[in-house]
Amino acid sequence: MNPEWRSRYDLALDVARKAGDLAKSYFDGSFEVIIKDDRSPVTIADRKAEELIRAEVTRHFPTDGFLGEEFGDQPGASGFRWVIDPIDGTKSFIRGIPLWGTLVGLEYRGETIAGAVYAPGLNQLFHAVRGNGAYRDQKRIRVSDVAEFSQSLLCYSSISWFRLNNKEAAFLDLAAKTDRQRGYGDFLGFLMVAQGSAEFMIDHGVHAWDVAALIPIVEEAGGRMTNWAGEVTIHSPDVLASNGPLHEAARSILAG
């Protein structure tokens, strides 16, 4: 593996775990919830976790750039950019639901090359770097080989997102074709696809930091992850992850 990729990949795993554990120290206690201008919530845990990641990365790679949910874009000169969601699933975090995670994505010249997702409530670290497969902790993971809608499991975050974007009918159409539907939202649904526990994860209303770490994991596990137009991008509000065989069929339903 390219040594520049390897060193950053190793650091991504380390900082994801450290930042997630820092956030968990607040999760187990008490904290203030602040409502941002976009009406989304944020806590001191979000901000402290992102600060930790930025500080650790800068100490090792001072010319790398950043894009984070809490502190925005910071251009770099190396070609590498770290895309950070310190707590994906802040609403779950606030309500005492342990299904939240720290997401650290790594880009090189605009391509997502690695991702680390640490779920403190599950004590699991999912990670991947291009060309090296996808892993949950030390175990290699792989998407399922299910190729029939009638045998598939569909994950989603919230029906309200589809309703807000006039896609409720498309969502229900797709859901009706599947065997089961589960609201394993935020990062978790994508990881369920990557480890072969589900065949689809669909969402609407995502940002770059919500998906950058997940694309390499899903793809290295053998799956596909695109927007509803079929493009691989972190800059789209709609996203579909799948195990592959039915991706285009599901995408056409959502895009129709």
Image: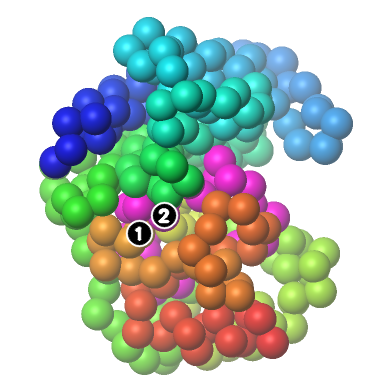
Up/down of 133 relative to 152, above or below: above
Question: Which residue is found at the position 57% from the left and 31% from the top?
Answer: 67
Q: Is residue 152 above or below residue 103?
A: below
216 horizontally vs 50: left or right: left
Q: Is residue 216 magenta?
A: yes
Mark 2 closeness class: few <14, some 14–19, many ≥20 residues within 10 Å = many
Residue at image x 36%, y 16%?
61
Q: Give how far across and how far down residue 13 sits, in percent.
A: 29, 30
Q: Amino acid at mark 1?
A: Val
**Judging from the image, what secondary structure is the residue with disc 1 in?**
helix
Q: What's the magenta region?
A: 191-217
Residue flagged by tag 2: what amino acid is it?
A: Ile
- In the rendered structure, find residue 218 and report the number of the disc placed on it: 1
| Position in image of residue 152 (x %, y %) | 40, 81
Tag on residue 226?
none
Q: Residue at x 55, y 52 (%)?
A: 234
Q: Which mark is residue 215?
A: 2
Residue situated in front as seen by the camera: 184 or 95: 184
Decide if residue 222 is in sight here.
Answer: yes
Q: Quadrant of the N terminus?
A: top left
Query: Which of the pair 72/174 is nearer the observer?
Result: 72
Residue 60 is drawn in which quadrant?
A: top left
**Can the viewer see residue 28?**
no
> Quick one: label 1, few (<14), some, or many (20+) residues within 10 Å?
many
The answer to whether mark 1 and mark 2 are in CB contact below 8 A is: yes
- Name the spot of residue 227 as percent of width and height, x first: 57, 67
Q: Name, please, the residue furthest toward the front.
A: 77
